[in-house]
Image: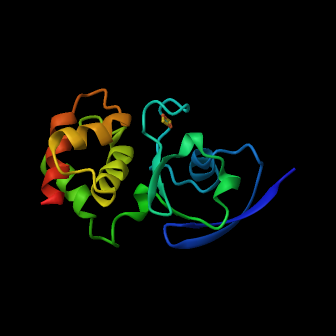
Amino acid sequence: EQVKVTLDINGKKHKLSIEPRTTLLDLLREQLHLTGTKKGCDYGQCGACTVHVDGQRVNSCLTLAVMQDGKEITTIEGLANGDKLHPMQEAFIKHDGFQCGYCTPGQIMSAVACIKEGHADSDDEIREFMSGNICRCGAYPNIVNAIKEVKN
Ligand code: FES
């Protein structure tokens, strides 16, 4: 049986009928074709699926879409302002905060939250906050530098 939910995604209201077991990740990728949010592990271990719900970061693979009724969701597609990249996106480019790029949307959503939630005062604090976002290419030092640049 389908359930009706209304979600505000990247500033746009969506009225949707979904199956109760649908994760927010699958809803974003498969129903709304917002494929910037990545599926790495699908069980909360890699951070590739990170989005913001009411301004807080969450692993969308661990989040049921029905629980988000009425909430504001921001994905990587909603970060830039028209043609103007978000400062964190600029900083990732400048500091080479990626190689293959698969983890990058999740890294950037976490990086934005890292500063917003006040966990970017030192390298250690940044590393701790970002520890749920795995990068197989090992771009970690560059990611920390990108966050520090936006913070300062
Ligand atoms: Fe959600 Fe890996 S896909 S944490």
Marks counted in the figure total 0
Residue under the image location 42 percent in, 60 percent down: 77
For the residue pair 19 and 110, the one nearer the viewer reads as 110
Please indicate whether residue 32 sits to the left or right of residue 10 in the image.
Answer: right
Q: Which of the 4 image quarters holds residue 46? A: top left
For the residue pair 109 and 152, the one nearer the viewer reads as 152
**Rendered-image quadrant of the C terminus:** bottom left
Q: Residue furthest right?
A: 1
Q: Is residue 139 above or below residue 51?
A: above
In the rendered image, residue 25, in percent from the top left (x then y), is placed at 57, 46
Coloring scheme of the render? rainbow
Q: Is residue 31 above or below residue 43?
A: below
Query: Can residue 97 be seen from the camera position used here?
Result: no
Residue under the image location 80 percent in, 57 percent down: 3
For the residue pair 23 and 35, the one nearer the viewer reads as 23
Please indicate whether residue 107 sits to the left or right of residue 96 in the image.
Answer: right
In the rendered image, residue 65, in percent from the top left (x then y), is placed at 66, 52
Query: Can residue 41 be seen from the camera position used here?
Result: yes
Please indicate whether residue 15 sits to the left or right of residue 133 in the image.
Answer: right
Q: Which of the 4 image quarters holds residue 127? A: top left
Q: Is residue 99 above or below residue 22?
A: above
Residue under the image location 56 percent in, 48 percent down: 29
In the rendered image, residue 58, in percent from the top left (x then y), is placed at 49, 48
Q: Is residue 13 above or below residue 138?
A: below
